[in-house]
Structure formats: structure tokens, C-alpha cells
Image (cartoon, rainbow, N blue to C red):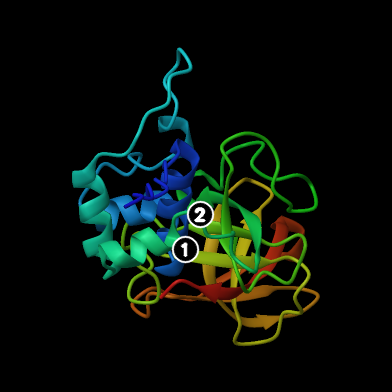
Amino acid sequence: MVRQAKAQRILTHDQIWGALDRLAERAGLSPSGLAKRAGLDPTTFNKSKRVTPDGRERWPSTESIAKALAAAGSSMDTFAGLIGDDASDGRSVPLLGLALAGASGAFDESGFPSGKGWTELALPTAEDSRAFALEISGDALAPAYRDGDVILISPRAPIRRGDRVVVKTKAGEVTVATLKRRTAKALELQPLNASQAEHTMAPSDVGWIARIVWASQ
């Protein structure tokens, strides 16, 4: 009898990390958002942690993978299916933490992502080639958005009354709110937290305003 040896599949470093990225994507989260939901350090799955300073590959632990699966409501079979899968049908968009969005150099004068600190996130709904994503930190925007949620912003999407928007002032302040009214003399915003008072600013103080077109809820 001739025994036929079964081909063994050797998993690579990129395949395992790619599967974790796709697991986060399926859950509507960034890698750091998935790590936080799993009760891990938010930087556990960051790309900067995947290779040591001296160039050695760093692999995720079985414990961290198990916690990520539980947080995403997925099984090991699902994870195995994500290994080696092609990337999402959508495209990657720049991703930055909302808390860092007010930093100098995070955006150019037109309101497009610029400078360091940005990572990438694959989102199937990104139709605007200039779209970018922001990850919510903390619960200041609850119940609309909670810690770890990701919002997709489309600079080219038309903005109408009642839309949720992100506004950055020329002074660097970033606000997430509902557009109540926009005229040549004033921009009126309704905070997402109903207990807060409406906010009005002069158009001359606005650096840019863009519509939120998707959220990972």
C-alpha cells in the first residue's frame, strides 16, 4: 500500500495578522477597537507591534486570538476561514483616533488626512476616494457613538440639515455634532449629547466640515 502524505499548510506571519485585521473589519472595528473590546491593551493588534525594533516578527498569542474571537462573536473555524482570504471588496481608508484629530498636521488645508499617525482600515462602504475614518475614544459622544466605534467621514458627500458631521475649526478644535442650520452668517450645531446646549460658530472660524456617512454600530 502506498501512503500519500497530506500536504501541510504552513501559516505565515502575514496570514495570521491579516486574519485578525479581517476579523476586526467584520465586527466593524479597527484592530485597536477589537483589542479594547477584547479587554486587551488597545495597541495589542497595532501594525507597529507586529515587528520588533530589531526586525523580528512578533506573533499574536493564542490567548489574544481567543479573546478577540469572543469579542467579535466568532469561532475558531471562522478565523481559520479568514486566513489567506483576499482583502475586503471595499478599499482601505485612512484611520486616526478622534482624540488625535485636532493635532497640528493631522489634516491639510482642504481637510484631507495628512502627516503621521494615520493607519488604514478596510471598509466596504467607502465610495469617496477622499474618505477617512476616525475611531471614537471614551463615551463623551454616547449614546450616539461609544468607545471603540469607527465613523467614516466623506469630505465630498453633500451636507444637509440633520446630517451628523465632523467640524474642525481653524483653531484646531474638532467637533462631532448634528448640523441644525447653515447660513452665510452662522453654522448651528446640535451636540450629540442632548443635555448639551446648541453651538453656533461663524463660517470664518470653520476650517472644514464633512459629513459622517457610516458608523460601525
| Residue type pointed to by label 2 | Gly
Image quarter for residue 44? top left
Mark 2 Cα within 10 Å, few/some/many (few <14, many 20+)?
Answer: some
Check whether the beta carbons of the residues at disc 2 and disc 1 lie within 8 A of each other.
no
Quadrant hosting residue 158: bottom right
Q: Cα distance, mark 2 to mark 1? A: 15 Å
Of 98 and 88, the residue lying toward us: 88
Q: Position of residue 155 (x, y in %)?
A: 74, 65
Question: What residue is at 39 percent from the left and 45 percent from the top?
Answer: 8
Residue sitting nearer the eye, 52 or 34: 52
Horizontal side of 68 relative to 115 (left or right) equals: left
Of labels 2 and 1, earlier in sequence is 1
Question: Considering depth in this image, is 171 or 101 the residue closer to the camera?
Answer: 101
Q: Secondary structure at mark 1?
A: helix
**Residue shown at the point (49%, 53%) measured from the top left:** 98
Residue that carries the numbered disc 2 in the rendered image? 84
Residue 197, image x, y percentages:
43, 75
For the residue pair 106 and 93, the one nearer the viewer reads as: 93
Q: Amino acid at mark 1?
A: Glu
Which numbered disc, 2 or 1, marks the residue closer to the eye? 2
What secondary structure is found at the residue carrying circle 2?
A: loop
Q: Is residue 72 above or below residue 36?
A: below
Q: Position of residue 190 (x, y in %)?
A: 51, 78
Tell me which corner region of the image, top left, top right, bottom left or bottom right, holds residue 80. Answer: bottom left
> Within 10 angstroms of label 1, few (less than 14), some, or many (20 or more) residues?
many
In the image, taking residue 151 as reference, residue 44 lies left or right, namely: left
Q: Mark 1 = which residue?
A: 25
